[in-house]
Image (spheres, grey):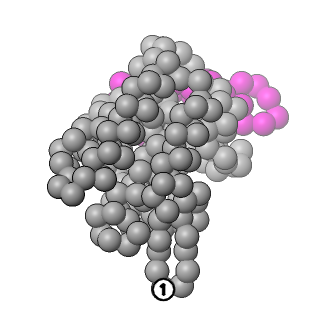
């Protein structure tokens, strides 16, 4: 995962938390539960986001880089305007990576669609979210739409946007599925 992707995910975590619990602070450990990062990578990217006034940091006096953080109004605007979330052109170009449901060889990329959806549903069940039913509904809508002969892209876009704002962790596997289906590489 490159620094751009890390920053996007951090902002999406903070955005989702702020929508659920306004003005709530998140700890370093909470971010690291969602994104497996070294302390150095997290510190580098948090400092960058703070310098851009997208997050606030309240550092704790400790040996490690320990902090509480929240998203700023500017960070919220960046996520909602798509300035951050639509920075995915770089991510989409690099989307071919080894994750559950993806089979990679030297000449072709193949996505096992059902395994990928099963992984998403498993993730929904494992997460303790008040929006669990809505997340399932939006993922199911995308899955069912993709099974149709004539796909309504607007329905997929609407669900994708909702998931981007409310369950950002579903975006990478869904993007892989969409690329595989819409480009015929599955």
Q: Is residue 165 left or right of residue 156?
A: right
- The magenta segment is 51-75
Residue drawn at the location 47% of the way across and 71% of the way down: 110
Q: Nearer the viewer, residue 138 or 76?
A: 138
Quadrant in the picture for residue 32: top right
Q: From this viewpoint, is residue 32 visible?
A: yes
Is residue 129 depicted above or below 140 in this figure? above
Specify the quadrant that holds the C terminus.
Answer: bottom left
Label 1: how many Cα within 10 Å (few below 14, some 14–19, many 20+): few
Q: Nearer the viewer, residue 50 or 169?
A: 169
Q: Is residue 18 magenta?
A: no
Q: Residue furthest right?
A: 63
Q: Residue furthest bottom?
A: 107
Residue drawn at the location 53% of the way across and 15% of the way down: 24
Q: Position of residue 183 (x, y in %)?
A: 30, 69
Is residue 125 depicted above or below 175 in this figure? above
Q: Position of residue 35 (x, y in %)?
A: 61, 43
Q: Is residue 71 magenta?
A: yes
Q: Position of residue 69 (x, y in %)?
A: 57, 26
Residue drawn at the location 32% of the way across and 45% of the way down: 144
Q: Determine the secondary structure under disc 1.
A: loop
Q: Is residue 10 left or right of residue 76?
A: right
Which residue matches tag 1? 107
Is residue 80 depicted above or below 142 in this figure? above
Residue drawn at the location 55% of the way across and 70% of the way down: 103
Is residue 122 depicted above or below 3 in this figure? above
Quadrant in the picture for residue 62: top right
Q: From this viewpoint, is residue 50 visible?
A: no
Quadrant in the picture for residue 42: top right
């Amino acid at each position: 995962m490159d620094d751009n992707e890390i920053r996007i995910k951090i902002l999406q975590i903070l955005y989702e938390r702020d929508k659920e619990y306004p003005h709530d602070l998140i700890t370093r450990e909470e971010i690291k539960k969602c994104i497996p990062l070294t302390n150095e990578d997290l510190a580098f990217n948090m400092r960058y986001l703070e310098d851009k006034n997208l997050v606030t940091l309240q550092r704790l006096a400790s040996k490690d880089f320990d902090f509480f953080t929240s998203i700023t109004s500017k960070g919220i605007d960046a996520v909602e305007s798509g300035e951050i979330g639509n920075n995915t052109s770089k991510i989409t170009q690099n989307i071919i990576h080894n994750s559950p449901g993806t089979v990679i060889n030297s000449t072709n990329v193949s996505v096992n669609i059902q395994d990928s959806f099963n992984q998403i549903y498993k993730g929904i069940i494992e997460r303790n979210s008040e929006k669990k039913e809505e997340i399932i509904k939006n993922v199911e809508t995308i899955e069912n739409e993709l099974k149709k002969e004539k796909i309504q892209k607007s329905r997929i876009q609407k669900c994708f946007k909702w998931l981007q704002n409310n369950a950002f962790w579903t975006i990478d596997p869904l993007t892989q599925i969409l690329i595989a289906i819409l480009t015929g590489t599955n």
